[in-house]
Structure formats: C-alpha cells, structure tokens
Image: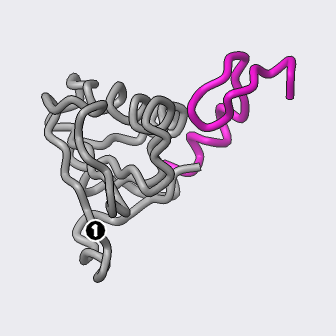
Amino acid sequence: MIRLIAHGTPAEPDVNVLVLANDADALAVPLDGVDRIELQFPKFTDGRAFSQARLLRQRRGFEGDIRATGDVGIDQLVQMHRTGFSSAVLKEGKDPADAERQFARFPSFYQGDAAGTQPLFRR
C-alpha cells in the first residue's frame, strides 16, 4: 500500500530527492545517491508519471521512495501502487481515511505489476 502524506507536511531532512519533470526520460537520469524520486501529476488527466514510475521500478530497479505529487486524487492511488509508487501527497482537502478504503475495495488483481510481479494464479 502507498504511504499517504498530508498536504503541507514539511520535507524530511537528509533525504536526497530527485524531482523528475514529466517530459524527462526515466531511463536516462542518473540515480546515484537518490533516496526519493518525486513525480508530478500537474493535472488529473496527465498520466505520464505512471509510466515513469513503472520504468524506474522495473527497468531501472530503483528501490527507494517514488512519491506522487501534484493533482493526486484518491481514485488514482491503487493504480499508482501497481505502477511503482510507494508514497503520495494527497491533494489538499482529501481525507486519508477515504484513500485507505480504496485499497480495501481492490484487494488483488489477476495480472502482475510493479508491486507484485507474479500473476494471481501463481501466488
């Protein structure tokens, strides 16, 4: 499940953060010493960060925190987890309790993903 961060929470000290632009090539950026990568959702209809997260987790093998920022809605969280996000800053005014209920609605999936590579019939 994704760790939910309240909007306006101060940044953690001593964390090397890479803020990746939506048009950046996730396969080409240097990741040496990076603890967290922040991927931006500038608006609800822009899903490029989903692809970037998947590439960072599965092709680059990044094991640190991949955080969703920007226009992050509750209905996106399950897909974010499946594509490789490990934390998300909810849009202002969104209740984290509502967000956690999303994960209870969808407990498993048939196909593998970045969170669990084995399909359901292999688990």
**Quadrant of the drawing holding the C terminus:** top right
Q: Position of residue 63 (x, y in %)?
A: 50, 51
Residue 98 in view of the camera? no
Q: Is residue 21 magenta?
A: no
Q: Position of residue 5 (x, y in %)?
A: 38, 63
Picture quadrant where residue 22 is located: top left
- Magenta part of the protein: which range? 99-123
Classified by dominant secondary structure, the portion drawn in magenta counts as loop
Q: Is residue 97 shown left or right of residue 110?
A: left
Residue at the far bottom: name it: 13
Instruction: Relative to 23, say whether 63 is above or below.
Output: below
**x 35%, y 25%: residue:** 51
In the depicted structure, whether residue 82 falls above or below residue 104: above
Disc 1 secondary structure class: loop
Q: Which residue is mark 1?
A: 16
Q: Report the residue at 54% width, 32% height from top.
A: 82
Q: In the orientation shown, which residue stands out farthest toward the right?
A: 122
Is residue 54 positioned above or below 6 on the image? above
Q: Residue 77: x percent and y percent?
A: 46, 39
Describe the colour scheme in one phrase.
one colour
> Which residue occupies the foreground of this view, 109 or 54?
54
Position of residue 63 in the picture relative to residue 11 (left or right): right
Tally the numbered discs. 1
Residue 122 in the magenta stretch? The answer is yes
Residue at x-position 35% and y-position 59%: 36
What's under tag 1, amino acid-wise? Asn
The quarter of the picture where residue 41 lies is top left
The structure residue drawn at horizontal position 26% and vertical position 75%, both measured from the top left corner, is 11
Q: Is residue 117 above or below residue 95?
A: above
| Residue 67 in view | yes
Q: Nearer the viewer, residue 31 or 108?
A: 31
